[in-house]
Amino acid sequence: MPCQNETSKGGGDSLDLHLDSRPFDLSPTGWLLGQAVRYLNTADKEGEFAYTQVVEILRRCSEDLLETLTRVFRSMKSGDSALRWNLLYVLGDAGNEKAAEFLVRVALQPLPDAREDLGCETERDMEMLVSTMAVHALQKVARRHPEVSDYILRIVSEKPARPILIEAVKVASELGMKDKVRELLSKEEHWMLEIRQARIQEVFAEPEREDGKERGFTPPKSGSLYTAPRSVCCTRKEK
């Protein structure tokens, strides 16, 4: 059963303008969606618990969740990449099989042209994060609704920008479609199938570890091994 989706009517253009500036307030489902985004960005156990509860309610509103989220998503400006990323994350957790088509479109949305004069976080970089999240959101939906798994193959077949293609290949492989992906890739792209996602335990360093004592903490090329040119005015003590 869809959530109630009625909004107050009347009041003229000023009310419409006010509501348009607050897209999460247009319906009960929109409000729940806003709460999910809020709790998603809360760094405590209480917020984590609240997020799971809101997601569970949103799943029951599945008939109008996608419509509501699509409206909010399209109302966002190009600079609101972080908010759109959050919306896609929530859709991955709460959406049903109807979300697959929308997620594919977002993943394949053309990226802005690359520019090297705009610093390390360009508009292209931010939009790439949004597209990548669409791929991973589709993976989460496919785990709950296996019938939409082939939508990942549509992304691979369209050959989007390489970072997005790599993520799609990884997701498809994790969903058990490695052989199908291999058929869609050229031989020069088969290396993407060998990318392995490391477990966090493999890269996490314990702060109190003691297995580095035998190597010590002497910087390389220091002491008697220091061979770089020295300034005459500097005196260096050898160890």
Image (cartoon, helix red, strand yellow):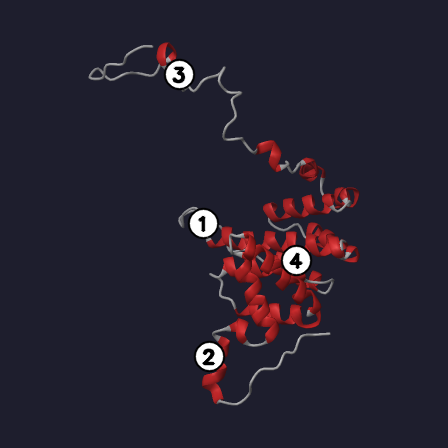
Of mark 3 and mark 2, the one earlier in the sequence is: 2
Of mark 3 and mark 4, the one earlier in the sequence is: 4
Residue type of the residue flagged with mark 1 = Glu
Q: How far across and how far down the image is residue 102, in percent?
A: 66, 63
Q: Disc 2 to disc 1, how far (Cα)? A: 32 Å
Q: From this viewpoint, which residue is outermost toward the left?
A: 233
Q: How far across and how far down the image is residue 211, in percent?
A: 53, 20
Nearer to us of marks 2 and 1 is 2
Q: Which residue is mark 4?
A: 93
Q: Secondary structure at mark 2?
A: helix
Q: Secondary structure at mark 3?
A: loop
At 73% across and 43% down in the image, what residue appears? Answer: 173
Q: Which residue is mark 1?
A: 121
Q: Which residue is mark 3?
A: 221
Q: How far across and how far down the image is residue 49, in percent?
A: 60, 57
Residue 186: which quarter of the image? top right
Nearer to us of marks 4 and 1 is 4
Of mark 4 and mark 1, the one earlier in the sequence is: 4
Mark 4 crowdedness (10 Å alpha carbons): few <14, some 14-19, many ≥20: some
At 41% across and 18% down in the image, what residue appears? Answer: 218
Residue 58: which quarter of the image? bottom right
Mark 2 crowdedness (10 Å alpha carbons): few <14, some 14-19, many ≥20: few
In the visual, does 107 lie left or right of 21? right
Q: How far across and how far down the image is residue 222, in percent?
A: 37, 15
Residue type of the residue flagged with mark 3 = Lys
Q: Disc 4 to disc 1, how far (Cα)? A: 27 Å
Label 2 close to label 1 by CB (< 8 Å): no
